[in-house]
Amino acid sequence: MGKKKLVQALLLPHIWYCDVVYSGMRQGEIDSLQLIFNACTRFVTGRRKYDSIRDVTTLILGSTLQNYLKFRYVCFMKKIMNHLVPSYLFEKITFGRSQRNLKLIIPLHRGNNRHLSFFVQVAKIWNMLPNNIKSESRINKYFELCKEFFKC
């Protein structure tokens, strides 16, 4: 699996640098990113351009691209909540009234592209998480639980 390590070491850091901006991508842009991962998967497995890769789509990331992006978004959200990033980002979060549900209020998103913004997307994903994951205070344990939840 030397090719897999090569892709993970040389390509993925360039793709994941500032990955939260991917939350604003339209479907066509997500499809382009998927094509990159498909090409990487074919390279790693030695398959040709038109060979099916359905049986190995989770080989590089450990999950589908969509689930991996969701995982990355909620990990960044936890960093925001724990004040591990600039404080102005924390000010953009609105918590729900119920301490039991630990939900985020989804920001108003009128306009053509506002629904694609990071805070709208991540609030929706965050609200899908079970309460035991959301309430985890240890960040490493939180990341581990999220990885398991998104099957990464």
Image (tube, rainbow, N blue to C red):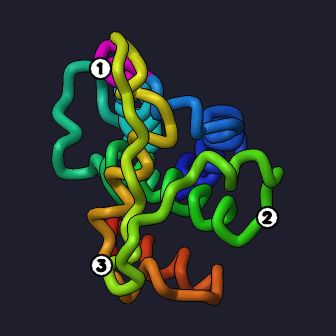
Where residue 98 appears, as percent x and y from the top left, is: 36, 78
Give the CA separation, mark 1 to mark 2. Answer: 30 Å
- Would you call the spot at circle 3 few (<14 residues within 10 Å), some (14-19), or many (20 or more)? few
Q: Is residue 68 magenta?
A: no
User: Which amino acid is tagged 1?
Assistant: Gln
Estimate how packed mark 1 is, as few (under 14), some (14 to 19) or many (20 or more) residues with alpha carbons within 10 Å. few
Q: Residue at x 68, y 51 (%)?
A: 91
> Mark 2, residues whose alpha carbon is within 10 Å: few (<14), some, or many (≥20)?
few
Specify the principal SS of the magenta part.
helix
Horizontal and vertical percent position of residue 97: 39, 71
Q: Secondary structure at mark 2?
A: loop
Picture quadrant of residue 101: bottom left
Image: magenta residue range: 25-31
Q: CA distance from mark 3 to mark 2?
A: 23 Å
| Residue where numbered disc 2 is placed | 84
Q: Residue furthest front?
A: 97
